[in-house]
Image: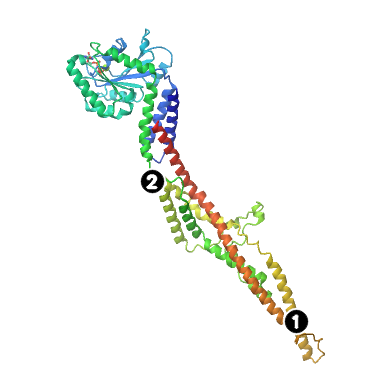
Amino acid sequence: MGRRDSLNDRVSDLEEAAEFAQWRLDATLIDEALAVASRIDRRLAFSTNHTVVALAGATGSGKSSLFNAISGTRLAEPGMKRPTTSRAMAASWGSGGDVAGLLDWLDVPRRHQVKGDDVALDGLILMDLPDHDSTVVTHRLEVDRLLELVDMFIWVVDPQKYADAMLHDEYLKPMAAHAEVMLVVLNQIDRLTSDQACDAMADLRRLLDSEGLTKAKLLGVSALTGQGVEGLRKAISRAVQSKRSVAARLNADVHRVADRLNQAYGNAKVAEKVPEARARALNESLAQAAGLGLVREAVLRSMRHRGVSATGWPVLAWINRFRPDPLRMLRLDKGVTKADRAGEIAPVSVQRTSLPRRAQGVQDARVDTALRELAAVASQGLPQGWVDEIRAKSLTNRAVLADKLDTAVATADLAMDSGHNWWSAVRILQWVIFFTAAFGGLWLLIDALLAYMQLPHLPRILIGKVPLPTVLLIGGVIAGLATAGLARIGVEAGARAKALRAERVLTKAMAEVSDELVIAPINAELTRYHEGRSRVRRAAAG
Ligand SMILES: Nc1nc2c(ncn2[C@@H]2O[C@H](COP(=O)(O)OP(=O)(O)OP(=O)(O)O)[C@@H](O)[C@H]2O)c(=O)[nH]1
Ligand SMILES: [Mg+2]
């Protein structure tokens, strides 16, 4: 039972490994693996208490005669005319189990139920096959078809043709994995002296061993005289009663195809996911292409511009307002407001920048190179089909990449409106200073006018030796410029911090885009490979 469970596990491992490899490894091999898996499922659906044993071999070797000798019947038709048997024929022993269903699946309409209670053969379905080396092509097709399905093989050879190249090269050697469920019978030993029979048996044993069939039993028999037939019956009986042949045959099937699939998967060291350094290199190229440098520069200049307008000497600041805001020119001035984040408004116009597309050709080429290198590094050691798949995956979203990056830049929160509350305080101070200076200036002007018109002048207040209005005017201008100068230092520091922050935010936003559009699809492909490989290894190891 345990064996059957592990067989089921191996079959599903094989099936999944084949499915993971679809379109990536050799299609014929994958189809074969899937066919084996479904064939095993079908066979296991029928009774595993029955063992289907086929007599196979060259024409005239004595398959039909042996069938009769083993079964003690005359159901098969041995003959002089070659080839004699043209369609498979089956005889079954014992009742119970869906023998009819099993024989339907095997597509063997010629069938007999052997009467009597031959306990030794209970559970046996013995099959007489046509000749595998037939001149009639349908015979060979029938043999090949049934050899795929039966649970155990008895290869019947005769003293003349036991070393036949076709038998060994096309059937025995390729089926070495199935040696455990294989019996080789040297028939017609009545035609040899006992020395000749010993020599022939030893020679055949050597041959089989050299072909990897050490596990295959070899028996010498004569269907004509009945010599050795009892031993053969016992060997069959043991196999049938142990009920292990079904699982053993199917296990060998899994083994054979899983080995080949395992080889196709390869065992090179393959990355589990895209290396960090590669992902970073790609992100840098993408950032360049999406104009990260330009945005950072624009943020820096825009913050300076706004800061100077807010904190500068009011007259100069007012002039400064007429110069365009660098961020606004890139349509990045809005950023993401609190309302946007709450989902209240998400105007489409915000989703696009006006970043210049001047050097786009060069940038695109850089991105293409980065994508190519990323795909090449990530797919190192993989089978060619998988390498192609990863390259294709790296380019799947190439067309939308630029747009998505631009949207990421356009919607990134550059936080341009925060962190500069002190500007307002400075602005108020600047206006106070400005009005103080203006007051002093006005005072002097009025004084000058009164003097011009020779009217009595305003009261004269001195600060030390300097008149108050002069102190107010000159002091105000100096204080205003000094405040503007000091504020300029703060503005510059703030602008730099803001530019750095913008760079960080944008880099992160772009990394998210590249993760989603490039890295994730490649990583999924790598995971698929590793999952498939671990499954096929399990299937092949059992
Ligand atoms: N001497 C001798 N002749 C045998 C023996 N077994 C079979 N024969 C003869 O060999 C000939 C062929 O036997 P079949 O049983 O028809 O051989 P087959 O393998 O079924 O042949 P196909 O159906 O054509 O593939 C017949 O004339 C048998 O009588 C044996 O053990 N000794
Ligand atoms: Mg025959």
Q: Relative to residue 90, is residue 305 drawn left or right?
A: right
> Ligand 2 is in which quadrant of the figure?
top left
Q: Is residue 264 above or below residue 478?
A: above
Residue 440's disc number: 1
Q: Which residue is drawn at 42% across and 20% down?
A: 48
Q: Mark 1 or 2, which is nearer the eye?
A: 2
In the picture, the quarter occupied by the N terminus is top left
Q: Is residue 378 above or below residue 307?
A: above
Q: Quadrant of residue 300?
A: bottom right
What kind of element bears circle 2?
loop
Q: Relative to residue 492, is residue 258 drawn left or right?
A: left
Graded by Cα atoms within 10 Å as few (under 14), some (14 to 19) or many (20 or more), the crowding at tag 2 reads some
- The image shows residue 402 at horizontal and vertical percentages of 50, 55
Q: Earlier in the sequence, mark 1 or mark 2?
A: 2
Which sits in the foreground, 433 or 518? 433
Residue 381's disc number: 2
Residue type of the residue flagged with mark 2:
Gly
Residue 14 in view: yes
- The image shows residue 311 at horizontal and vertical percentages of 67, 71
Residue farthest bottom in this picture: 454
- The image shows residue 167 at horizontal and vertical percentages of 25, 26
